């Protein structure tokens, strides 16, 4: 009986998703859900949409699996981080801290589909599950708009910071600026995960310079995973629009910035007591100017004899 109920529930979910997919996916149809509020107390226990930890326990759910470390909550409170807002839309994931827009993660149809393909390369699922995930659930998710507010305890003596108005304007892309910093680095990894630059292995550089460069090495298992997924290179590039990432020649979602969101992100990170003050100072000084950098980082992996895939054009 229980199995039949599970099958009916799954069938209903798939049917609903198919309807939504047919209505839009990345198209004009949108299903906007009410805001969900997550209230985190001083002990780190969240009350989600009015469902308290005590209520979760009553229904046999362990509330400890949702608990945040109280020390972390205390540091966020001392930083006067009153609330974080997440907004998932068909074109990206937007977030705000204390009502200030941070750098969003944005996508279009192509980069969203490329991400789905990348997931299936690394997460091995059976054919039926993969079909439902990639052809039904993920496309239908883009038709749904969900807004989540996570609130933390307010610091004593601090005034309440108002929430962003729901349905308010989203952060706009930045305008193009001339780069003031241009650079590039190409790292080629061998099967053992040891990188080389300009044909010189990091093992040789370590011997010559007497420096420890082990942090730049990859575990051999990671290199093998890249080979199994047919990923020959990963390109990370800063542009006036944002940070763009490609796997082979496939563009993934973009961290799309503007001067406003870069400054807000730098100020927010620098103000968090979770971050070392020295690092916070560096972030506040340099992060706002990332849109003026033209930096290209290419990570190349063994091809296993496969035909070479062209790198993204600059």
Image: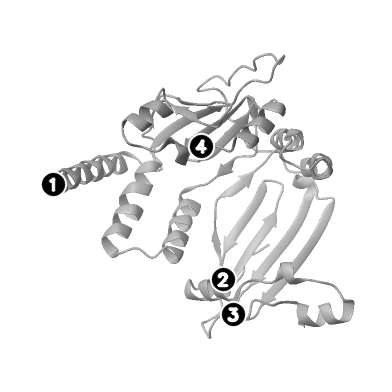
**Labels 3 and 2 touching (C-beta < 8 A):** no
Tell me if residue 72 can be seen: yes
Distance from label 4 to label 1 (Cα)? 33 Å
Circle nearer the N terminus (4, 1): 1
Label 2 to label 1, Cα distance in Å?
41 Å
The residue carrying mark 4 is 67
N-terminal of the pair, mark 3 or mark 2, is: 2
- Whole-percent x, y for residue 273 in the image: 74, 35
The residue wearing badge 1 is 4
Q: Which label is found at residue 302? A: 3
Residues at marks 4 and 2, CA–CA distance in whole angstroms: 31 Å
Image vertical order of residue 41 relative to residue 299, above or below: above
Residue closer to the observer: 42 or 189: 42
- Classify 10 Å Cα crowding around label 4: few (below 14), some (14-19), many (20 and above): some
Quote the CA–CA distance across marks 3 and 2: 12 Å
Percent from the top left, x then y, of residue 60? 32, 36
**Residue found 60% across the figure and 40% down from its top:** 104
User: Which numbered disc, 2 or 1, marks the residue that appears first in the sequence?
Assistant: 1
Residue 222's tag is 2
* 195 vs 300, nearest the viewer: 195
């Amino acid at each position: 009986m229980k199995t039949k109920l599970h099958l009916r529930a799954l069938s209903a979910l798939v049917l609903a998703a198919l309807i939504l997919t047919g209505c839009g996916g990345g198209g004009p149809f949108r299903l906007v859900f009410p805001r969900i509020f997550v209230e985190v107390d001083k002990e780190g226990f969240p009350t989600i949409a009015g469902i308290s930890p005590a209520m979760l326990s009553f229904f046999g759910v362990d509330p400890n699996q949702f608990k945040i470390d109280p020390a972390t909550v205390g540091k966020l409170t001392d930083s006067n981080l009153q609330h974080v807002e997440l907004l998932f839309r068909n074109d990206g994931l937007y977030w705000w801290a204390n009502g200030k827009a941070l750098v969003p993660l944005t996508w279009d149809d192509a980069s969203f589909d490329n991400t789905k393909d990348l997931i299936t390369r690394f997460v091995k699922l059976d054919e039926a599950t993969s079909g439902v995930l990639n052809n039904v659930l993920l496309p239908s998710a883009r038709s749904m708009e969900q807004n989540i507010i996570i609130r933390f305890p307010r610091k004593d003596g601090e005034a309440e910071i108002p929430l962003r108005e729901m349905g308010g304007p989203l952060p706009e892309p930045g305008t193009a600026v001339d780069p003031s910093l241009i650079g590039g680095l190409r790292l080629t990894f061998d099967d053992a995960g040891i990188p080389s630059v300009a044909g010189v292995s990091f093992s040789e550089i370590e011997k010559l310079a007497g420096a420890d460069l082990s942090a730049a090495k990859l575990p051999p298992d990671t290199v093998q995973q890249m080979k199994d997924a047919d990923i020959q290179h990963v390109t990370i590039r800063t542009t006036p629009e944002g940070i763009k990432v490609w796997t082979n020649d496939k563009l993934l979602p973009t961290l799309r910035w503007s001067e406003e969101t870069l400054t807000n992100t730098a100020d927010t990170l620098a103000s968090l007591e979770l971050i070392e003050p020295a690092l916070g100072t560096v972030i506040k000084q340099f992060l706002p100017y990332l849109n003026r950098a033209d930096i290209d980082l290419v990570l190349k992996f063994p091809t296993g004899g496969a035909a070479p895939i062209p790198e993204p054009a600059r």
